[in-house]
Structure formats: C-alpha cells, structure tokens
C-alpha cells in the first residue's frame, strides 16, 4: 500500500476511493474479483449487453467481460481511454465510447483530478467535496472539453443493456435524464454530500419505471437487503447516513 493510501486509510476515507487501483491490480485477478464476478452474475448473463458508464481504468469492465457479456465502456478521460484501449481494445466483446453521457447531446467541461476516480463533469459535486473536506489534499488539476451523448443514443447504437453501472461523480442524475428505455438493472454510487441529488435519481427511476431498490454497502459485493424496497424505503435507509462520510456503497435499481 502506498504512503498516500495509508494516510487515506487512517483518515477513514480510502473506502470511497475503492475504485482507485494500480494498473497491475486492475489487470490481475484476485479473490475479490472472483467475488465481484459472482455478485454481478445475478444481473448479467452470457451474451447480454452491459454499459460501464464511468469505466475509468476498467476494474469493473474486466469483471463484466469475464461474464461473457458485451461491454460498452463509457469514459472521457484521455489517460483512462489509453489504458482501456491498450488492455481491452482487442477483445471483440468490448466497445469503447470516449464520451460522457448527459441529458442532451453536446459538449461540457470536465474537471480532471490527480486521482482519476474523482474527475467530474459536475461543478456542484466538486464544491460539495471541498465543503466536506472528505478529500482534502486531492485536487482537480485541469479541465478538458468532452463530447456528450445521451443514454438513449447509446442504446440506439448498441441495443438495450440488461445492466448499467453508473459511476460518474455527481453526474448521475444528468445521465439518467437522458434515459427513456427500461433497463432491467442499474447501479449508481452513493455519496453522502450529494444525497439530495441521489434521491432525485431514485425518484426519477421510480416515476419512469416503477423501480425497486437495494443497496450494497462498502465493498462487500452483497446486497444488504433480502427484499427489494420502494423508493421511499431506500431513501429512509440512506437518510440516516447523511453526515457519515465513512459510509459508502452503491444503490441498485431493478425495473423487472
């Protein structure tokens, strides 16, 4: 573990950076990778389509590919694009879209962090992180202009996915506003500073698709609840953690 990771772990904030992996860790196969494969197999079958939105360097991409699904990786960061192309580009089951997703097609400024898992298209998300101090010492070094398309445009090009993982640092609501097609399962990251916007994601999916919800806390690769919940129930559950910056995980939604 690097010195910076040791410090982050001591401060109790390494958890939210769980997808920050070294290249070697991403390309190897670990016990935890096997656990992730078993976990995601409940959402994906062989030959089905998966959208990895916010693919970063592919630590989830490799899991989805191991399930023999067709993976569409969506990632606008140049360094991550190079890594994905180099390590997954020859796989016929993988397609890379070097873009961001939003409510409408266009262009936007993306703020690039020195820790690429924290790069974001949302200025508000960055402001909230600065206010909370959760990632003190980690900044945003530059901004780049990225192309934006909609979720629906990606579906038109590749087909409707059975599962979509969305990890876009505060831009989740914008991504979901560009979706009008029913998807069996989706996941999106929980961040305590951005709870109100996350609740809007839940409400949008509930309204559009009558979705049910579950949660996977920390990096356990288990659903926390045996039974799927209503939008109100998952919001009530998460509300108790609004000020707990050590609590993290992912919301899962199903529409079937």
Image (spheres, grey):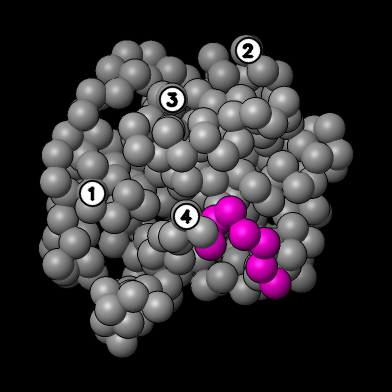
| Front: mark 3 or 2 | 3
In the image, residue 26 lies in the stretch drawn in magenta: yes
Q: CA distance from mark 2 to mark 4?
A: 32 Å
Disc marking residue 156: 2
Is the residue marked by circle 1 packed among few (<14), some (14-19), or many (20+) residues within 10 Å? some
Vertical order, 155 against 206 (above or below): above
The answer to whether 78 appears left or right of 184 in the picture is left
Mark 4: secondary structure: helix
The numbered mark, 1 or 3, whose residue comes first in the sequence reads: 3
Mark 3: secondary structure: loop
| Front: mark 2 or 4 | 4
Quickly name the residue at label 1.
113
Vertical order, 117 against 216 (above or below): above
Return the residue nearer the eye: 1 or 221.
1
The numbered mark, 3 or 2, whose residue comes first in the sequence reads: 3
Q: CA distance from mark 1 to mark 2?
A: 31 Å
Q: Residue furthest bottom?
A: 10
Task: Please provide the residue range marked out in magenta.
Answer: 25-31
Is the residue marked by circle 3 packed among few (<14), some (14-19), or many (20+) residues within 10 Å? some
Quickly name the residue at label 3.
98
The answer to whether 70 appears left or right of 108 in the picture is right
Disc marking residue 23: 4
Mark 2: secondary structure: helix
Q: Do callouts 3 and 4 mark residues in contact (Cβ within 8 Å)? A: no
Residue at the (42%, 72%) spot, across then down: 15
Residue at the (61%, 44%) spot, across then down: 61
Q: CA distance from mark 3 to mark 2?
A: 17 Å
The numbered mark, 3 or 4, whose residue comes first in the sequence reads: 4
Q: Do callouts 4 and 1 mark residues in contact (Cβ within 8 Å)? A: no
Q: CA distance from mark 3 to mark 4?
A: 19 Å
Q: CA distance from mark 4 to mark 1?
A: 17 Å
Residue 70 shows in the view: yes
């Amino acid at each position: 573990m690097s010195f910076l990771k040791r410090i982050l772990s001591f401060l109790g904030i390494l958890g939210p950076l769980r997808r920050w992996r070294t290249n070697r860790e991403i390309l190897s196969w670990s016990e935890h990778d096997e656990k992730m494969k078993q976990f995601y197999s409940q959402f994906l079958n062989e030959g089905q389509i998966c959208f990895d939105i916010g693919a970063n360097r592919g630590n989830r991409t490799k899991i989805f590919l191991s399930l023999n699904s067709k993976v569409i990786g969506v990632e606008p960061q140049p360094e991550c694009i190079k890594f994905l192309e180099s390590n997954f580009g020859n796989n016929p089951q993988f397609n890379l879209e070097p873009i961001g997703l939003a409510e409408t097609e266009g262009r936007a400024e993306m703020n690039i962090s020195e820790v690429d898992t924290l790069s974001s298209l949302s200025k508000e998300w960055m402001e909230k992180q600065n206010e909370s101090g959760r990632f003190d010492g980690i900044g945003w070094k530059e901004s780049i202009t990225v192309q934006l398309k909609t979720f629906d445009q990606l579906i038109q090009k590749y087909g409707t996915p059975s599962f979509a993982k969305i990890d876009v640092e505060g831009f989740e609501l914008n991504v979901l506003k560009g979706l009008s097609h029913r998807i069996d399962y989706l996941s999106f990251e929980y961040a305590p500073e951005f709870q109100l916007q996350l609740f809007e994601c839940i409400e949008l999916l509930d309204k559009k698709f009558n979705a049910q919800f579950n949660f996977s806390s920390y990096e356990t690769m288990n659903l926390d609840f045996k039974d799927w919940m209503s939008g109100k129930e998952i919001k009530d559950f998460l509300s108790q953690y609004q000020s707990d910056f050590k609590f993290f995980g992912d919301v899962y939604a199903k529409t079937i």
